[in-house]
């Protein structure tokens, strides 16, 4: 566990990282236990000698030990935070505060937890060293490290079957780590691909799909499983055509386009220049042919993609995050978070709360997390629907499908 002196931090906005860090390392290493009723006072012996009965055994309350490994980067307390380090530290504090609020909520039901907090410093070497820490190894649940390189260094040490290691925020493929203990909470790209393929085959039922490539090899991470899923779901009745597009030239495809049915274009690219040119060409074709586009999940965060254009192309995007800020449950969380920390919760705080609530309750109810596939959970940001993948651990497979409508993303699945 980590202790730190109370130094001022150069922060922006109302993040209050110094306050949160002080509270974090002052209290997080101590047991978070519900008060236990005192043992009954012994009864005075009777004057009549009878065989003494053994006193009833008082069971100790179950205490779930959880270790959080987050990138606080406390070495910067003395030198001052860089912008990049500050961003990562803010993510760590936001996630921690959401996670802790969830455990605090669960203790009201009589559940008991001990929460240990460690600084990964966003260094693979530090993550590797923490994997040998006996206090971490004894945990019922390890949460983190957060970033893929750190998580890889950590999980490379803990390969034998043991307690679960939660990847809390990264959507990196579990194949990157190949660790049977891993729990991937944020659906990886494979889950997005499966959701897109399922929606296309079940809701649209096209005869043909066009995949437009920019030529970058990383696009195969989307294309290969997508084609496999389409062949399986469509029983090989849907023809898939691939084309590497240069300077937006799509004339070669025009003879194959349909006038009365939707022409499905799947574009796994994320390159800005490629997307701007290619989407403009599709926009021109859409004046004559019915066109529906399915984009990479990263498109949701691209400000250079304009909603007007995406709406004209009937663009669909998959996403594992769908926070309804008007829902009563979300409003209740925001109210409690503000009262506890005097700041507004970020999406990282919401994810920390969801994961703390889900895994904290499972730990309290069961001796292990081997039955996650039987415990679906609807959180504030997503649904947890875990499947066990041989050699890769547990993977959350739930992904939403959105379509641009009225210049905003509307959920269609």
Image: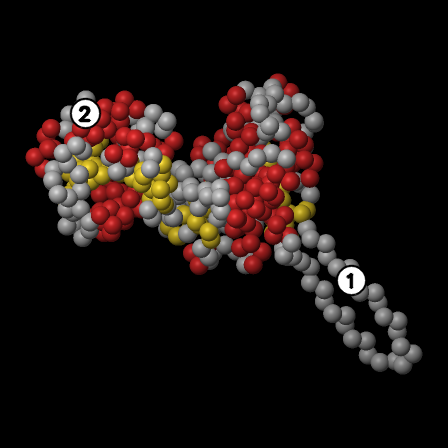
Q: In this view, does 181 lie to the left or right of 77?
A: left
**Residue shown at 29%/44% (left/top)?**
196
Q: Residue furthest front?
A: 406
Q: What is the x, y in percent for residue 216?
A: 26, 28
Taking 407 as reference, is 351 left or right? right
Q: Residue at x 29, y 39 (%)?
A: 316
Residue under label 2, please give it: 248
- What residue do we see at 49% from left, 30% from top? 124
Of label 1 and label 2, which has the lower sequence position? 1
The answer to whether residue 338 is above or below residue 231 is: above
User: Furthest-right residue in view?
Assistant: 47
Neighbor class of circle 1 (other Cα within 10 Å; few <14, some 14-19, many 20+) is: few
Point out residue 96 in the picture as x, y percentages from the top left corner: 58, 38
**Which residue is denoted by mark 1 in the rendering?**
39
Q: Can you say which quadrant of the picture contains the N terminus? A: top right
**On screen, 59 above or below 176?**
below
Q: Measured from the top left, where is residue 7 in percent x and y?
A: 68, 23
């Amino acid at each position: 566990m980590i202790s730190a002196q109370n130094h001022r931090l150069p922060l922006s906005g109302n993040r209050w990282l110094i306050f949160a860090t002080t509270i974090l390392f002052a209290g997080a290493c101590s047991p978070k236990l519900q008060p236990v009723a005192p043992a009954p006072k012994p009864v005075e012996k009777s004057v009549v000698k009878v065989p003494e009965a053994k006193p009833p055994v008082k069971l100790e309350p179950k205490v779930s030990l959880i270790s959080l490994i987050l990138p606080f980067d406390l070495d910067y307390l003395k030198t001052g935070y860089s912008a990049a380090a500050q961003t990562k530290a803010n993510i760590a504090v936001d996630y921690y505060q959401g996670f802790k609020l969830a455990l605090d909520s669960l203790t009201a039901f009589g559940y008991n937890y001990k929460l240990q907090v460690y600084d990964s410093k966003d260094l693979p070497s530090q993550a590797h060293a923490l994997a040998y820490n006996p206090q971490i190894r004894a945990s019922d649940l390890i949460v983190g490290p957060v970033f893929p390189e750190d998580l890889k260094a950590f999980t490379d040490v803990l390969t034998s079957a043991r307690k679960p290691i939660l990847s809390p925020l990264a959507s990196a493929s579990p194949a990157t780590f190949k660790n049977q203990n891993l729990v991937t909470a944020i659906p990886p790209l494979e889950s997005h691909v499966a959701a897109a393929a399922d929606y296309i085959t079940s809701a649209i039922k096209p005869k043909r799909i066009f995949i437009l490539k920019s030529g970058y090899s990383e696009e195969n991470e989307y294309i290969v499983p997508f084609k496999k899923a389409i062949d399986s779901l469509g029983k090989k009745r849907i023809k898939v055509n691939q084309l590497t597009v240069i300077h937006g030239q799509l004339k070669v495809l025009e003879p194959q386009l349909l006038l009365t049915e939707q022409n499905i274009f799947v574009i796994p690219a994320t390159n800005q220049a490629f997307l701007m040119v290619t989407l403009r060409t599709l926009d021109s074709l859409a004046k004559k042919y019915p066109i529906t586009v399915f984009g990479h999940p990263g498109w949701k965060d691209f400000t250079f993609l304009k909603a007007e254009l995406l709406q004209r192309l009937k663009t669909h995007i998959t996403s594992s995050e769908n926070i309804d800020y008007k829902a009563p449950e979300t409003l209740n969380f925001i109210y409690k978070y503000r009262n506890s920390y005097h700041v507004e919760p970020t999406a990282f705080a919401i994810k920390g709360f969801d994961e703390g609530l889900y895994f904290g309750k499972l730990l309290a109810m069961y001796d292990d997390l081997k039955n996650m596939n039987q415990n679906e959970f609807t959180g504030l940001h997503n649904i947890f629907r875990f499947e066990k993948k041989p050699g890769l651990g547990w993977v959350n497979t739930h992904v939403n499908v959105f379509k641009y409508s009225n210049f905003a993303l509307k959920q269609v699945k």
